[in-house]
Structure formats: C-alpha cells, structure tokens
Amino acid sequence: MAMPSRWWCTCAAALLAAPVAAQQLTPVERARVAAALWSEARYNVPAWDRIRADWDSGFADLLGASSVRESDVSFYRRLRRFVALLGDGQAAVIPPPSVGARLARPPMALRAVERRPFLVDYLEDDEMRVARPERNAEITEVQGIPVEEWIRDSVLPEIPGASDAARWDRAVARMLDGEKGTALHLRLRLPDGEERGASVTRSVALTARTPLTPPALQVDTLPDGVVWVRLTSFADPDVSRAFDRAFPDFSGLRGLILDLRDHDGAGGGRETGYRILGRLEARPLLTPRRRTPQYRPAYRGQEAPDSSGAWFEVPPDTIPPRHDLPVFNGPIAVLGSHRTAGAAEDLLVACRNAGRGPIIGQTSAGSVGQVGEFRLFKEWRLRLTVTRDAFPDGTEIQGAGIAPELPAAARVPDFLAGRDPALERARSAVRDEAARRLP
C-alpha cells in the first residue's frame, strides 16, 4: 500500500506545481520579450536625440541576462531598468496580472520635500498600530542604508522620468515597493526630532485602490471665498461631470485655484481635462502641437540611428468654450509641480496659451504626449510616449516641462508647520486680480 500512496503524493505535487511552472517565462520567452521591447522602442520613440544612454548596449545586457535563473518579478525589474533608459516619464512595462499581483508596498503614502522622503499618511491597520509611525515623520534609513543611498542605488534606476526632479519625486513615492509579503525596517525622524525604528510589511498591492489613493476631484471653499479644486486624475470621464455638478453656475465665487500638483498623468484623459477647461474660458484655447515619427528607411544612414528625420506633424487644435453650462470669467490660478505630468501638462499648455491665469509652483514633469501601448509577448505589454509635443511657437515640452510664472515650493520647515506656500501665493494672486476688477 505504501507504493500507491507515494505515487499519489508525487502526482498530486506535480499537478499543483504545474500552474506555477506554466507562469514562469523560459529563457527563450524572456529573450522574445526583450527583443520585442527593444524593437518597439526603436520604431516608435520620437525623441532619440534626447536619450543619453546606450540603448543597444542595454539590450545586449538584457539579452545576456535572459538565461539567468530568476523569478519573473526579478525579470520584470530588469525590464523596468531598461525602459528607464529612455527618459520617458510615461513609459512603463506592464506585466501579466500573475506578476503584478506579487508586487506591493507598505500601507503608507510618501512625498519628497526638498528631496527628503516624508510619511504623509498611512492606513491604521494592526501592523501600523504596532509600528506607530507618525504622520510627517521623515524616513532616514531603509534596511539600515541611508535613505539617499537607498533611493539612488535601489530605486532610481527603475524609475522612468523626463527630468531629474520628476524622477526623484517619483522614486520617493515608490521607494518602498517590492515583493508582496516582504518586510522592511525603517529609521524614522519624528516631527519633534526624536528618532526610532519601525518595521513594516509590503502588504498593499500596487494596483489596489485604498483610502490613501486621493479622489480624482476634491473641492474646498477657502475662507476668502476662493475655491480650491484639486484634480489628481482625468482617467475617468465622470470627473468632468463631477466638476459640472460641483459648479452648476459658479455663483458667489471670487476666484478659483486649479491644483494639478498631484496629477501624475497616469491613465490619460486629455479630453476630460479639456472639458473642465472649457468651463473656465469663454474664448477658444490652443492645445500643444505634436509630431510623431514617420518611418522611412531612406532616412536612416550611418549618421542616423533611426528615421526621426521624417515626421507626421499635427498643428495645435482648438478647445471650444462650453455652451451647455455657464463659463467662469473670474480670476483663476493654476498650481503645478514636478509631479504634474501627461494630460495635466496639456492643460498647463492651454492655460499658458490663453493667458488665463498664472501658473504657480514648480516646473512640471516634462512627460507630455500621446501614449501608445504595444503587446510584447503574451500578456506582457509596453507603454511609450509616441508624440513629441510643443507649444504653438515650437518650444518643446518633453524633458523641459512647463515653468511657472510664479515659482513657489514648500521647504521642510513649511511642510512640518503645515504651510503651503504655493497655495498661499495662488490665493494672493487670485484675490489681487479680483480686487483689480472691482469697479
């Protein structure tokens, strides 16, 4: 009887292991993913002249590593490092759900202030009640490594970004990401100066929406009658309808502040943003001009590694004002930051073109343009910026971003004291404009 029992256990173990083995990429499949990624970028990236890394050498290294025995999560991280060489803030490798589900972060939200990582919020679950982190605490070490070194060596190489400032801000926000269930030991400096340790677990899936995820639209009326509108995503078309519900006629408004500082561009939604802007300007608004590579092999030669000498160009479009609801003609100001990217930068361009109100804060991420998504192999996909956007006068945005007319950024003492210099400067600008318009 012992032999059949052992035979049954062996078969059962093999059956249970089969799905896991089927999910693991073979060396040949990894090489196919790497080759498809290299090819799609070579064919579609519109800004090779801005790329300082050796893309082909990076591909050779990636291809050479395809035979190394490692998990699909480790391979995914290699792909992320490769794609980060493009300097495209909207670029991303999208893994299959089976791989993505194995990635998580602790239930904490982080933000960079003067390049230093601060804990701005956390979920009060059982682990956090034991760890007792404090909001506004600064993280000074991760796994015993000074935090700047941790970010520079372990996080930044995998973070895509069109500017150094934008990459660093993103790296801080993602500095605790990793394999689900793994533990981290942090060294914290509390707001009162006390230092202590805290152990946390990567328990929240990167794809999960939690109470730490800010709403796409938040509206607050400030004490002086100015309304503060925070927009963090245009991905859902209902955001513009929610704006319309919040402002059926703009009655009683002295001014409006449009806050795009936490809109990182994920999910697109350019038209959603334009519908909101159509309620804030009675004249047509100009959008960015754009061009995309038009592949012509004859343009390639020894001096040209790609065909970007040939372009399909699209002139600026016009955003018409909305006529279904009243348009707000009062003073406005727009807030931007290093985190402002993608469709939010399209709005900054339109506001700047119209001279509708000052842009206040920091230079935006410089990660604007139409995004294309390409299948690599099975469920592995690649997202890239496929257009090169500019102001109507030809001034390019990629990498440079959109600079504010009125620079303002929180310093660490401001942050710890709960002050928001950019918001205060916007309130002042709107109030001054409202007073100027008084008869």
Image (cartoon, rainbow, N blue to C red):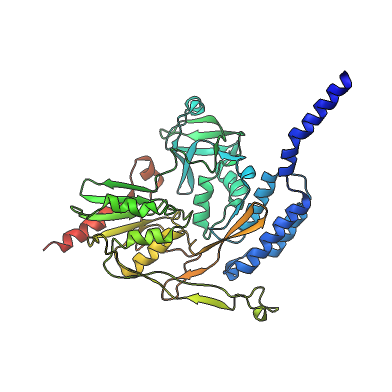
344 with respect to 106 (left or right) = left
Q: Position of residue 160 (x, y in %)?
A: 57, 55
**Between 412 and 109, the one nearer to me in the picture:** 109
Q: Is residue 407 visible?
A: no
Quadrant into which the N terminus falls: top right
Q: Position of residue 16 (x, y in %)?
A: 74, 33
* Residue name at image x 55 percent, y 44 percent: 175
Quadrant into which the C terminus falls: bottom left
Farthest left residue? Answer: 439
**Between 381 and 419, the one nearer to me in the picture:** 381
* Residue name at image x 86 percent, y 23 percent: 4
**Between 107 and 119, the one nearer to me in the picture:** 107
Q: Is residue 286 above or below residue 330?
A: below
Q: Is residue 365 visible?
A: yes
Quadrant in the rendering for residue 45: bottom right
Quadrant in the rendering for residue 431: bottom left
353 with respect to 293 (left or right) = left
341 with respect to 152 (left or right) = left
Looking at the rendered structure, the number of numbered marks drawn on it comes to: 0
Q: Position of residue 206 (x, y in %)?
A: 54, 42
84 with respect to 314 (left or right) = right
Farthest top residue? Answer: 1
Q: Position of residue 128 (x, y in %)?
A: 49, 29
**Between 97 and 408, the one nearer to me in the picture:** 97
